């Protein structure tokens, strides 16, 4: 990114100094993964890391980094999968399943192709179906509509 190693280290150190709970959480996840050989998402889906037992330092370090990231990224992926199912159920219930087709998931986004005359009705269903609460954290959703991906306009 054009910065020096020293500047990166300073940023890293100041971040974890400002947010010590994050550092403690990541260290706890790493130690649990070393002990068990896997991590779990909030929903219990496991990811195994056999490289944590590697004698090669770079393999072990890479697996430690992946293990620290897996519960967060994996839980986010689980939440999106749950949202896909909730949207599908809501569209079925509203008899709109044939008018809206899931084309693509990109990280935390769902891209649907919707029949032009059904856009307003489908939007009223998809947004609330995706907006859920987990452990007191409310997930809000933004929605965009357009003729193609490049021309999407923000909509509430």
Image (cartoon, rainbow, N blue to C red):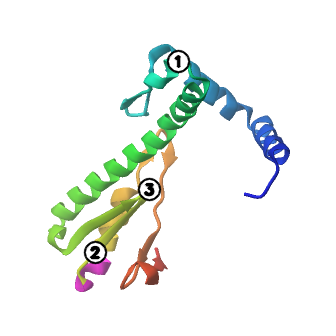
Q: Is residue 91 magenta?
A: no
Q: Residue at x 48, y 43 (%)?
A: 73
Residue 149 screen position, x and y as percent: 41, 78
**Sequence-earlier tag: 1 or 2:** 1
Name the main secondary structure of what is drawn in magenta.
helix
Residue 49 lies in quadrant: top left
Residue 112 screen position, x and y as percent: 31, 70
- Crowding near the residue tagged with mark 3, few <14, some 14–19, many ≥20 C-alpha atoms within 10 Å: few
Relative side of 98 to 31, left or right: left
- Crowding near the residue tagged with mark 1, few <14, some 14–19, many ≥20 C-alpha atoms within 10 Å: many
Judging from the image, what secondary structure is the residue with disc 3 in?
A: loop
Which label sits on residue 34? 1
How far apart marks 2 and 3 lie (CA) works out to 17 Å
Which residue, as the protein is rendered here, is positioned at the far front? 56
Looking at the figure, which quarter contains the N terminus?
Answer: bottom right
Residue 98 lies in quadrant: bottom left
Which label sits on residue 107? 3
**Sequence-earlier tag: 2 or 3:** 3
Q: Residue at x 56, y 25 (%)?
A: 60
**Which mark is in front, 1 or 2?**
1
Relative side of 18 to 136, left or right: right
How far apart marks 3 and 1 lie (CA) works out to 28 Å
Residue 126 screen position, x and y as percent: 32, 65
Query: Residue tagged by mark 2?
Result: 113
């Amino acid at each position: 990114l054009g910065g020096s190693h020293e500047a990166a280290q300073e940023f890293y150190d100041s971040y974890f100094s400002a947010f010590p709970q994050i550092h403690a959480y990541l260290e706890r996840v790493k130690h649990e993964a070393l002990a068990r050989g896997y991590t779990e998402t909030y929903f219990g889906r496991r990811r195994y890391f056999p490289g944590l037992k590697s004698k090669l330092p770079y393999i072990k370090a890479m697996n430690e980094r992946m293990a620290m990231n897996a519960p967060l990224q994996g839980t986010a992926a689980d939440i999106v999968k749950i949202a896909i199912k909730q949207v599908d159920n809501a569209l079925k219930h509203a008899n709109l399943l044939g008018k809206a087709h899931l084309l693509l998931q990109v990280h935390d986004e769902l891209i649907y192709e919707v029949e032009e005359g059904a856009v307003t009705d489908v939007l009223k269903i998809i947004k609330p179906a995706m907006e859920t609460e987990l452990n007191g954290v409310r997930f809000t959703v933004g929605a965009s509509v357009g003729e193609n991906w490049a021309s999407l306009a923000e909509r509430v």
